[in-house]
Image (spheres, helix red, strand yellow):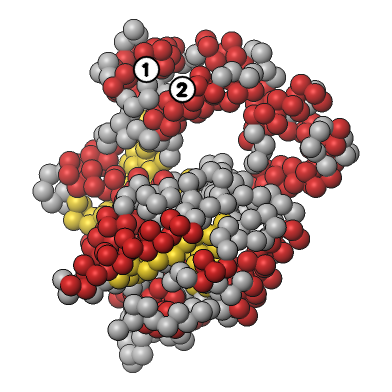
Amino acid sequence: MVDSTQRPQLSNKQVSALFKSTADLLQILGESRFVVMAYQNAARTIDSLEEDINTVASAGALQDLPKVGKAIAEKIETLLDTGSLPYYDELAAQVPEGVVAMMQVPDVGPKTVQRFWKELNITSVEALEKFAQEGKLRGLKGFGAKTEERILKSIDLLRRRSDDRTPIGSSRPLALKIMQELGESSAAGTFERIAIAGSLRRWRETTGSISLLAVSNSPEEALERFRTLSRVAKVVENGPGGATVALVDGLQASLRLTERKRWGAALCLATGSESYIAALSAHALDRGWRLEEDGLSALSSASTIGNGQSPQAVLEGEKRYFESEESLYEFIGLQWVPPELREGAAVVDAALDRKLPRLISASGLRGELHGHTTWSDGKSTVAEMAEAARNKGYRYWAVTDHSIGLGVTRGVDAKALLDQRKEIDATNERYAAEGIDFRLIQGTEVEVLGDGELGLPDDVLASLDIVVASIHSGLRQDRERITERCLKAIDNPNVDILGHPTGRLLGRRPPSEIDLEQVMRACANNGTAVEINANPERLDLSAEHARQAVELGCTIVINSDAHSISQLDLMPFGVHTARRAGLRAESILNAKPLADLLALLKRNRSGRYVK
């Protein structure tokens, strides 16, 4: 084995990517699924590591990793020692480079790529695009004009996709872990304050890097702690006021230091988008102040205080410092702007008029209306999920296991729902006997089938307390067909909620071609609530569409779609998506008490649990 000091120091992301590419090549070449899965599992394990893979290898602990056997461990060692993997090179020599690249096109899998290559001699994304444009893919069995159109759209999406941005579901937990490690590893008092900044503080769906701002009484020690974090692969930039590092996860992270008295301005400038900061700076200039990283600087003796106080005499160049953002905003006459709204210029005008909405908060939610248990594909029982939801402070939680009709998971049928009802009733009776103010609601996540019919009969759906209708299959149907399919489900009087409406998976699957405006208008007309699915892989509806939905008259529901107890913790991603949309509690169905909620459903079910 090569001395660790001579290693090429590949990052976890690079190693994971090579093993995933190996799995892709094996699929294209028709290798057995067990061999393919071995490399896919290894890639996932490495990708989820919090420790540098080089450190694990140096400790001789590769085979201790989940799903990493002797053969895979030896290949990891070879890759880390030499910077290359002969096995991968042997596979790659059998497949044109452009063939593998075609697998990056959304919805184009290895079997389809193999057919393009073997049957039509297509060996690049560019060639695939040309064949589709010229109608030449129709020569393949099962391919038609609509398939060609869909592939062209997917290629366009691939080119527009920003590969250097990471979904918030990965970047935000990583930022929190870094902050936790800094706090645990530093001496007492090293970090007086530390906060997430940038697009992560605005809760954008994706981020290019992790930005942190801190106040420290020991700047040199603080930066050294940051540079030597366990997740750091290398130091990219280093200076007296901050540092940037490359992480083993592939992301970059930066830490910038400021002083306590400069915190307000520094955090403000480190948070907003460029257009927002430009508008905020312009407003400050109108008041005679220049907004700088350390505070405000008076442009002349005519500079004024903008918070309703009488003008005060100031000297040109005089500085004002702010320990908080709130005091900075108040000084220049603005209502404090929540970070989620700091994307554009218009919000500054609203802040000047003191007309910003009072946004929904996590504490404003009374419960959830979409979650799963072991009755379908959940990991926890009804009782376990109920207790976890109650410990979250919820007053109600809906059991909405998948219906039959969804081929990829075990679903509940009419008989199973009757048995489940008995379990739910027994759990509720126990809570009532103990004087606990918490109720389970029985429902289902019913599958919208290919023709718009639902996976359970109407009489079964009518017996439930709530019904979420979702599309999981056929997401690549053309715009007209998938829209009509969704509209048919919405028109069903038993459907209360439209779940994750576009079916997107961030960075993995594009949204369907559904006419979302038409669907949301139908939801408003039919009294069907529209879901913001809080799972950070979805965030569906997006903030933009959630805002549009409320403008069209829809009610929004925020659900974690939890399949385990731990996934209940995903709710903040949905709440902050709603906040980015500017939504108030009044627009959120599950911000209401149970009695009010049930009364607002499409069918007022006579208040089964209403006292």
Vertical position of residue 315 compared to residue 372: above or below:
below
Q: Identify which residue, 347 or 560, lies in the foreground.
A: 560
In this orientation, which residue lies closer to the viewer: 466 or 586?
466
Q: Quadrant of residue 141?
A: top right
Residue type (three-letter) at the residue carrying disc 1: Gly
Give the class, few, some or many, for how many residues have Cα within 10 Å of label 1's Cα (few <14, many ≥20).
some
Viewer-proximal residue among 476 and 603: 603
| CA distance for labels 1 and 2 | 9 Å
Q: Amino acid at mark 2?
A: Ala
Q: Residue furthest bottom?
A: 310
Q: Which residue is mark 2?
A: 38
Q: Earlier in the sequence, mark 1 or mark 2?
A: 2
User: Quarter of the image holding residue 361?
Assistant: bottom left
Residue 98 visible: no
**Which residue is more in the foreground, 333 or 378?**
378
- Give the residue furthest to the top: 1
Quickly name the residue at label 1. 69
Decide: few, some or many residues near mark 2? Use Cα within 10 Å; few <14, some 14-19, many ≥20.
some
Task: Say which residue appears at 23% left-offset and 39% top-offset.
Answer: 225
In this picture, is 546 found above or below 250?
Answer: below
Q: Is residue 484 left or right of residue 218?
A: right
Residue drawn 55% across the image and 72% down it: 494
Residue furthest out toward the left: 188
In the rendered view of the protein, which quadrant contains the N terminus?
top left
- Residue 297's x, y, as percent? 37, 70
Q: Give the SS element for disc 2.
A: helix
Q: Which circle marks residue 398 in the picture? A: none
Q: Quadrant of the C terminus?
A: bottom left
- Contact check, label 1 and label 2, Cβ < 8 Å: yes
Q: Secondary structure at mark 1?
A: loop
